[in-house]
Every structure is written in structure tokens, then in C-alpha cells.
Image: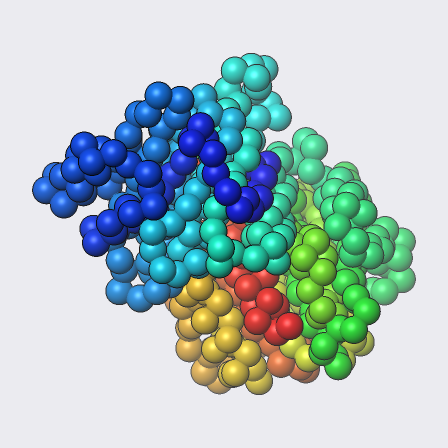
Amino acid sequence: MTKISSVTSVSNQENVVILADKKSNFKDAGFSKQELAYVKDCITKKEQKMVTINQYKRAVHIAVIKEGKTEELTSEVCRRAGCDMLAVLNSDKLDRITVRSALKNKIHLLAFAEGLALGNYQFLRYKTDKKKLAASLKSIRVHSRDVSSKDIARLNASLQGSLYARTLVNEPLWFLTATQLSKEIQKMGKESGFKVQVFNKSKIQSLKMGGLLAVNKGSLDPPTFTIMEWKPKGFRNKKPYVLVGKGVVFDTGGLSLKPTPKSMEFMKCDMGGAAAVAGTMYAIAKAKLKVHVIGLVPATDNRPSGNAYVPGDVITMHDGTYVEVLNTDAEGRLILADALSYAKRFKPELVIDLATLTGSSIAAIGTIGMVSMHEGAEKQHEKLQESGHNVHERLAELPFWEEYGEMIKSEIADIKNLGGPYGGSITAGKFLHHFTDYPWIHLDIAGPAFLDSRDSYRGIGGTGVGVRLLFDFFVNKV
Ligand code: BES
Ligand code: MG
Ligand code: ZN
């Protein structure tokens, strides 16, 4: 991971990046007259986004930021500019860089550093030539009077949480079974300070988690149910926040088998919600945020086999609800439902679930953002939307009208796991809603959790989406 730190002075031998805009005068950059004239010319006349001055012992790079429509959108311009700058720094084989800013707002400098660090992430476990392929950049030093050590600690925490989440998503099934996922979460708990408890199959059986057990029936590997808790001294909230993450470590679709191209081949990403929850727990514990948060991750793979659950089956859920299974590929809602019922015992202030739940959410808005639904959590949802803008992981709210609830009524059981031909994300949401009795927000992250082509600092493969979002949400609670 690229480490971010703060410094109070910079020698004239340090490689530096200066964030600037067209109006910047570079007074304290220490440029000679000629250099200054050259820089000004590149920025104003040639409209360059990047300018480099090669001095005797170092290079000074200027990243020219074009203001966005809002302050938050300017932050996103900065993250992307940070990622663009990486190509230059890594090809120069720098192992550290100092960043400073000629812009007023410190959040833009922090966003630039964040873009550098997120963009610099690599998943090299399965490359033989790791050393050769590894990016040279190892540390980023932020030079600013306005940035506090708390800002830096929080940035590192959310960064590390996000990158852990990415790696969990990038790990294939041969390694990341449900049991291994629980072990990885335990490691993350040890490293950051949150508590972890793992329920094994017999405990899950005794809790009658019929959704999780049904999905697991076709698998040779046992399911797990992982409970995380961060409860620091002096926490501010009376009732806990509960985060629930879908932990389908691989989704073949089960007997309702998926086709391979552009579908099943990406399904190691189906624990993206679980990764986001674990990454968030890691970040808030690392940053020692004074909030009481519980994380729940039901986990299994979804496979066909001689004993797999079948379309037409009726299963009994943790809360006693009878569910008719019409499609074994609609498995996420079954395992989440048990976790959502389990969450009732905590009398939560708010429950947020994150899940790579439906292809129809991707059909609706693509991979840029996530779709959201909520019940009894109007204000909290607004706050979460604000965080979405702050970190550029935005929520697109879908209607959640009663009529959609009618579509999951079953002829022979209480409800069925399949809605009509349209509005699939919403009927999936309505299915989950059946198992809640508290303020609740549902985030369908099927689109942004995993990218099959690179997108700037979001990278390729697992994006860690959800971690920066929830971290920002909780930072605003303390
Ligand atoms: N894991 C998938 C959803 C998904 C699709 C995630 C694409 C990431 C990328 C989920 O379990 C699923 O299969 N959903 C079905 C539900 C349908 C059978 C009602 C879908 O969306 O097609
Ligand atoms: Mg599925
Ligand atoms: Zn799935």
C-alpha cells in the first residue's frame, strides 16, 4: 500500500507535485523567471493539464486542475489528476513524492493524494514477476499547513480499508472460500482492533438460517456467518449501526446456471458487499471513530450439484418466513434476508446492506454509481447521498412503491425470490424489506463493485466501492 504522511517543510531536492489552476502565480514555488514564464505559457496558452520542470536534482510537476461544477466534483477532478500523474512518477521510478497545493481548499489536495494512492494499487499475487511489475512509488508526503495529522490518519484508514476490500474481491474462489473470507476478516479485525466472531455450519443450522443453508446446499464448502463489532470507549450513538454485506464467494447461479461469457466469469466479485463491510469496519477501527458499528457477513458459494436447492423448492428462513425459490440465481437476497432478520436483535439505529444483488441495477445506471432504496430512513439516506457526492460513490435512488411488494407474493408460500420481468432491483429490495423492522438502507453495488476495464483510480477488477462512502458517513457522525 502507498503510505501517506504529512511534512512541514520540503528541501529543494525533493520531487514535488504542485496542484494549481490557471490563476495560480507560483509565488513560493521557487521557480526562476524563465521557469515561471515557461510554466505560465504551458498552462494558459497551451492549456496543458500537466507541466514538468526538470531541475538539477529533482523534477517539479504541476497538475492543472479545472474546477468542476461543485466543490465535490472538483475533488473528483483532483483524484483523477492524481491517478494521471502516477504514470509520470512511476516511469521516473520515484519511490516517494511530495504533494502541495496552490489551491485554497485542503480537501482538493487530499483528494489528489487519494487518487495517487488508490490508482497505485496493484494485485500482483498471481504474477511471477512481482518485483519487475511493482510500481516504484511507495510513499506520498503531503506538504500543507492546513492538513492535520487527523486528516492524514483518516485518509490512510479509508485508503487501507478500500484496498483490502479490493484484494478480497480480486481473490478467486480457489483461495477465498466462505471459510477463508471469515479468516481474512479475522485478520483485518486483529490488525485494526474490531472484534470478530465466526459462526460455523452447525451454529448456522441451530439458528435455522434457512436462506444461507439452502444456497449452500449445492456446495462442498461450508457456509460461514461472520459478526464484526467496533465499540470504542465514548462512542456517540445510543443504538448501534449495523452493516450487512452479501458474501457470495462465487455465484454460478446454481441449477439456474449462468452463462460463462461476461457473466459467470466475473462472479468472484459477488462478495463485494462483504468486502465493503469488512473494509469499512477496518477503516473506522483504524481511525478510532467513536461510533458503535456491527458488521454481518453471511457467506457461501452458490453451485449446482446432486444436492443443490432447486427451482420450486420452499425454504424456511431464520425468521420463519416461507420462501418459494423460483430461481436459484436469485441467491443473494436469500442469504441477506437471514442476516437482516438476525440484525433485529441489535435494535439498530440504522441498518445498511451492501450487495452485488441484481444485473438489473447495472441495466438501470451502469457501473458509475449504485442504486439505493430505503424505508424509515429518509434523513439518513440524505446524509448518505451527501457522502456519496463527497467521495464520488453516488447513490441513485429508485422508487420503492408498495405495488412492487405485490410482485413477490407467492401462490404456495409467503413470498417468492423472483419478481416480474421488470424492475428487478426494486423487487429484490422489496424481498429484503420483508425481513427488516428498523430504519434501513439498501445499496445494490452490482455495477460499481467490479470493473472489467480500467477506470482511472478506481482501477480494474475489485474497486472497494462502499468503503470510502460509509467511512465518510461515519466520520460525519462523530
Ligand atoms: N450476483 C448476481 C448479480 C450480479 C450481476 C452481480 C452482475 C454482479 C454483476 C445475482 O445473484 C443474480 O444472479 N441476480 C439475478 C437475479 C435474477 C435471477 C432475479 C440477476 O440479476 O440476473
Ligand atoms: Mg445469482
Ligand atoms: Zn449473486
- Say which quarter of the image contains residue 203: bottom right
Specify whether 346 is left or right of 271: right
Residue at point 21%, 54% (across, down): 23
Query: Is residue 427 in view from this perspective?
Result: no
Q: Where does the image place residue 394, in percent across and percent down from the top left?
A: 42, 63
**Count of numbered marks:** 0
- Say which quarter of the image contains residue 87: top left
Q: Where does the image place residue 342, in percent across and percent down from the top left?
A: 77, 70
Nearest the eye: 186 or 224: 186
- Say which quarter of the image contains residue 330: bottom right
Residue at point 29%, 47% (across, down): 27
Q: Where does the image place residue 217, in percent across and percent down from the top left?
A: 74, 49
Nearest the eye: 118 or 223: 118
Residue at point 35%, 21% (across, down): 56
Specify whether 281 is left or right of 24: right
Nearest the eye: 367 or 196: 196
Q: Where does the image place residue 357, in percent across and percent down from the top left?
A: 54, 58
**The C terminus sits in image quarter:** bottom right
**The N terminus sits in image quarter:** top right
Specify whether 444 is left or right of 22: right
Query: Is residue 128 in view from this perspective?
Result: yes
